[in-house]
Amino acid sequence: MAQEIEYQFGVRWSVNGLASSIDIQDIMLNFKGVQSEQNTMLPITEYVKNGRNALQFYAWPVPSAEPFEEQHELRLSVEYWEPGDNPNTDAKTAFEVVMMPGIEDATPEIVATNPAAPVQPRESDINWDQDNFRLTVPFNNRQSMPTWCWEEGDILQDNAATRDSLTRAYRRLHALFAAGDNDALQDAASTRTEELAIASNTPEEYVRHRFSYDMYFDNPDVYQLDDLPEEPMTLNLGAGNRVAWLTTQGVNVPIVFSHVGTKDAATFIRPYFINRNGQWEICR
């Protein structure tokens, strides 16, 4: 698995007065269900493979039945930088796409490209789906990459048997949270730790520390673990049906720490699973 990565990648997106969600390979990276003036970048190296990749950028008015206004703008770019560089100051733009959904007959436009970048947009495949508020931005990556776990999981069926099997994995994971067993939780996510260490060019111990749950376990007066729902949850599949996760209502996930003394504040634990050799495995 160990392989040096020449460049690391990030996605930057912005909206003005819209709710939004950003996915890659149909795996959700970020969701903001309220109107916002957002300009955000997240690393995506661990979600980028050799060859064709695709970002899905959702943006919609609130409420969604309202029309887009002429000034509404979706802006998305893929950034790259060398390991050890600061992406906030050293990142270069590989390409940038803009969509103005409130303008009649508008289509996505590539407003910047860097031919020297290791990733390039697939211009003819970029499209805006008005019915689903989705801008799809495929791109090619010509840089050699490791084979990530989300490429290697078994292809899953979207049915009750898969959902029920994954539910049992969630219950085992929830039991570790209930027991406050941070070491066991880290061990359960060893694949994620190994791959994020490669993607970010950082030691595995740093990744384990970044994903430590001790803050929640050490402050029970602040964070309270919710019970898992008893009713069946919704199965979600991404990455060509090789990645799976469960949701309850909308994009909400079942493992949640409520913030004591607040009405709605909570921390959502969002693992992404693959099934390999008959076993569920935390991949991201």
Image (cartoon, rainbow, N blue to C red):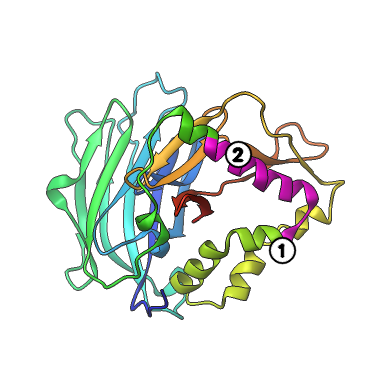
Relative height, residue 262 to residue 25 (above, below) = above
| Residue 34 visible somewhere in the drawing | no
Which element type, helix, strand or loop, lies under badge 2?
helix
Where, quadrant-wise, is the N terminus in this rendering?
bottom left
Q: Nearer the viewer, mark 1 or mark 2?
A: 2
Return the residue at label 2. Answer: 168
Mark 2 residue type: Arg
Considering every residue shown, the one lying at the far right of the view is 221
Mark 1 residue type: Asp
Residue 170 part of the magenta segment: yes
Please give the name of the residue rendered at 66% of the width and 45% of the height, measured from the top-left corner: 172
Please give the name of the residue rendered at 73% of the width and 60% of the height, measured from the top-left corner: 182
Q: Is residue 260 left or right of residue 18?
A: right
Return the residue at label 1. Answer: 183
Please give the name of the residue rendered at 41% of the width and 28% of the height, measured from the top-left corner: 61
Give coordinates of residue 201: x percent, y percent.
47, 77
Considering every residue shown, the one lying at the far left of the view is 124
- Tag 2: Cα neighbours inside 10 Å, few (<14), some, or many (≥20)? few
13 or 209: nearer the eye?
A: 209
2 or 172: nearer the eye?
A: 172
The answer to which image quadrant residue 134 occupies is top left
Residue 72 part of the magenta segment: no
The residues tagged by marks 1 and 2 sit, at their Cα atoms, a distance apart of 20 Å
Relative height, residue 56 to residue 193 (above, below) = above
Give coordinates of residue 11: x percent, y percent.
38, 57
Please give the name of the residue rendered at 46% of the width and 22% of the height, measured from the top-left corner: 63
Give coordinates of residue 279: x percent, y percent.
51, 51
Highlighted range, magenta: 165-183
Name the magenta segment's main secondary structure. helix
Considering every residue shown, the one lying at the far front of the view is 278
